[in-house]
Image (cartoon, grey):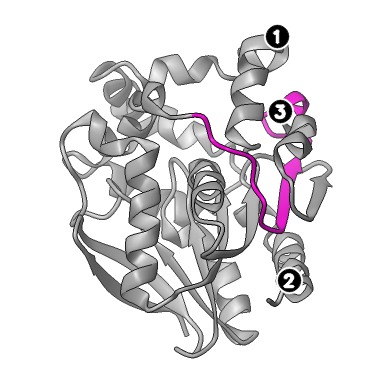
Amino acid sequence: MIENIRIPTPAGTFDALACGEQDGRAVLLLHGFPEAAAEWEFQLRALGGGGCRAVAPDQRGYSPGVRPEHVTDYQVSELVGDVAAIADELGWQRFDLVGHDWGAIVAWATAAALPERVRSLTAVSVPHPVAFTTARAEDEDQAERSRYISVFRQTGAAERRLLEDDARALRGIYQWKVPEERVEDYVRRFSEPGALTAALNWYRAMDLMPEVAPVSVPTLFVWSTEDAAIGSAGALATEKHVTGPYRFEIMDEVSHWIPEEAPEQLTRMIMEHLLAHRV
């Protein structure tokens, strides 16, 4: 069964979902925007039932107990620090890391910074940050797909636009690919005072992101052809930024919301990746 747990760290206390025996293989799953740990419900159950101890935290800004006010508190170095602090509190010296959307960016940066602790990386939807940044600058298709980022960075205006008219714009982001009851949960969360601003501050801190080094740990990258936000340029270029064993999987006819739209297929890939890299 999935447990609700709390993880105290120097930055504050993270809310999290967990599944599996305490002595199972450690797997940390990082959610994206605009979602929460609940996006990994299917994967948590499968991994927890398959010999892993799988934990998915509500990340910085999403957990009410870790919701600082300043944009600088949401730079990637702080988010990577949260991953390390969470792993420390869980007693995990080494762990497998899975991330989707913004969670993938944090996972890429963590794997690059802490290769001695990350046993394997699974990144879903978002390419290596350098490949993605280059695609935004040089590829017209990706530049067009990324126009929403400038909107999200508009303090105050973005919050009003996303939440007005019963959160019509926020609901539209999910493209009717995420289960309705899950969308209602997300909308409720982001309607709480300060919650949406904290989540959007991840975008507002993007200029503070240092260049992420190539990743040396075994890596699985999963991208989908119907992703409205991420085009093929960055996805195809990601292999240039992985020096360790690398597997690239393309899901046809699947949107950006892979963990919830195609949970069985993604989970099978994750478990194959974990089995292939046990050490």
- Magenta segment: does it hold 170? no
Q: Nearer the viewer, residue 57 or 173?
A: 57
Residue receiving disc 1: 140
Measured Cα–Cα span from mark 3 to mark 1: 12 Å
State whether residue 133 is above or below residue 257: above
If you read the primary sequence from the N terminus, does the residue marked by circle 1 or circle 2 appear first? 1
CB atoms at circles 3 and 1 under 8 Å apart? no
Could you tell me residue 74's position as x and y percent?
30, 37
Q: Nearer the viewer, mark 3 or mark 2?
A: 2
If you read the primary sequence from the N terminus, does the residue marked by circle 3 or circle 1 appear first? 1
User: Going 35% across and 70% down the picture, which residue do you hit?
Assistant: 88
If you read the primary sequence from the N terminus, does the residue marked by circle 3 or circle 2 appear first? 3
Left or right of residue 165, residue 29 in this image: right
Residue receiving disc 2: 277
State whether residue 212 is above or below residue 192: above
Measured Cα–Cα span from mark 1 to mark 2: 37 Å
Residue 166 visible within the image: no
| Three-letter code, disc 1 | Glu
Could you tell me residue 185's position as x and y percent?
37, 54
Locate the C terminus by quadrant: bottom right
Could you tell me residue 57's position as x and y percent?
38, 62
Q: Nearer the viewer, mark 1 or mark 2?
A: 2
| Three-letter code, disc 3 | Gly
Q: Nearer the viewer, mark 3 or mark 1?
A: 3
Q: Mark number for residue 42?
A: none
SS at badge 2: loop
SS at badge 3: helix
Q: Mark number for residue 234?
A: 3
Measured Cα–Cα span from mark 3 to mark 2: 25 Å
State whether residue 95 is above or below residue 254: below
Tell me where the magenta segment starts and ends, as one range: 211-233
